[in-house]
């Protein structure tokens, strides 16, 4: 055995530190109403810092309302997720692992500070993320600070590999690597 324990009984009247902590006054728990203004301010700051115009945010809100899967995810996020993952069906299961990070504010679905993009708007956002043709890692880095959806990393990788402008450059780099 790695440790050799010796347990001794010590009467409570000799444990001055424990006695003082036990008798320390406890403030009543703060109500959630006291935090509401701070939370609202923080959430508004996050939404204002999103790199999207008001028009784009409205587009996202409208698509979130139309998409059945995301409507259900928003409902679970606001009112509570089921206790068991097996009760979920279809694409909603993809959100199970992120359920603790999701929140709904002002009609938008957020994962932490990232805006969740509905499927029909993802191709536009992928194109905007990759505007500078910076490669997989930089594009992932740009996405990580602003956008999210299940499978975004895979979608970024596929888009970069299939980019017609970058393909000749990557082929030259591959040939150079083969020579070395």
Image (cartoon, rainbow, N blue to C red):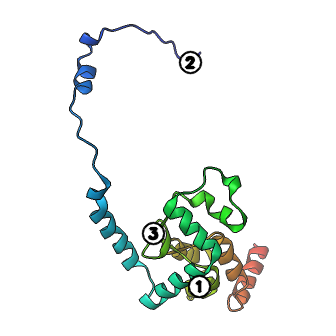
Q: CA distance from mark 2 to mark 1?
A: 55 Å
Give the residue drawn at x 52%, y 63%: 77
- Above or below, 125 against 141 in this view is below
Circle 1 SS class: loop
Residue 129's quadrant in the figure?
bottom right
Any mark on residue 43, and which?
none
* Residue bearing mark 1: 130
Q: Quadrant of the N terminus?
A: top right
Q: CA distance from mark 3 to mark 2?
A: 45 Å
Circle 2 SS class: loop
- Above or below, 94 against 122 in this view is above
Left-right relation of 3 to 33: right
Q: Quadrant of the C terminus?
A: bottom right
- Above or below, 37 against 50 in this view is above
Residue count near mark 1 (Cα–Cα under 10 Å), binned few <14, some 14–19, many ≥20:
many
In-front residue for pair 89/117: 89
Mark 3 or mark 2, whichever is nearer to me: 3
Q: Are marks 3 and 2 in contact (CB under 8 Å)?
A: no
* Residue bearing mark 2: 2
Q: Position of residue 130 (x, y in %)?
A: 59, 85
Give the residue drawn at x 22%, y 25%: 23
Any mark on residue 113, and which?
3
Q: Are marks 3 and 1 in contact (CB under 8 Å)?
A: no
Sequence order check, earlier mark of 2 and 1: 2
Give the residue drawn at x 52%, y 76%: 142
Residue count near mark 2 (Cα–Cα under 10 Å), binned few <14, some 14–19, many ≥20:
few
Residue count near mark 3 (Cα–Cα under 10 Å), binned few <14, some 14–19, many ≥20:
many
In-front residue for pair 164/5: 5
Mark 3 or mark 1, whichever is nearer to me: 3
Q: CA distance from mark 3 to mark 1?
A: 20 Å
């Amino acid at each position: 055995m790695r440790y050799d324990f010796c347990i001794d009984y010590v009467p409570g009247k000799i444990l001055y530190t424990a006695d003082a902590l036990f008798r320390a006054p406890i403030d009543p728990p703060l109500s959630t109403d006291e935090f509401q203004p701070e939370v609202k301010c923080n959430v508004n700051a996050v939404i204002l810092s999103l790199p999207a115009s008001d028009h784009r945010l409205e587009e996202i809100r409208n698509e979130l309302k139309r998409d059945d899967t995301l409507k259900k995810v928003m409902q679970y996020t606001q009112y509570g997720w089921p206790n068991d993952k097996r009760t979920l069906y279809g694409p909603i299961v993809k959100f199970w692992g992120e359920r603790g990070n999701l929140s709904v504010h002002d009609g938008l679905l957020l994962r932490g500070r990232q805006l969740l993009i509905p499927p029909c708007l993802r191709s536009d956002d992928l194109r905007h993320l990759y505007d500078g043709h910076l490669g997989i890692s930089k594009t992932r880095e740009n996405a990580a600070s602003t956008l999210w959806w299940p499978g975004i990393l895979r979608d970024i990788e596929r888009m970069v590999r299939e980019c017609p402008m970058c393909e000749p450059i990557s082929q030259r780099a591959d040939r150079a690597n083969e020579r070395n």
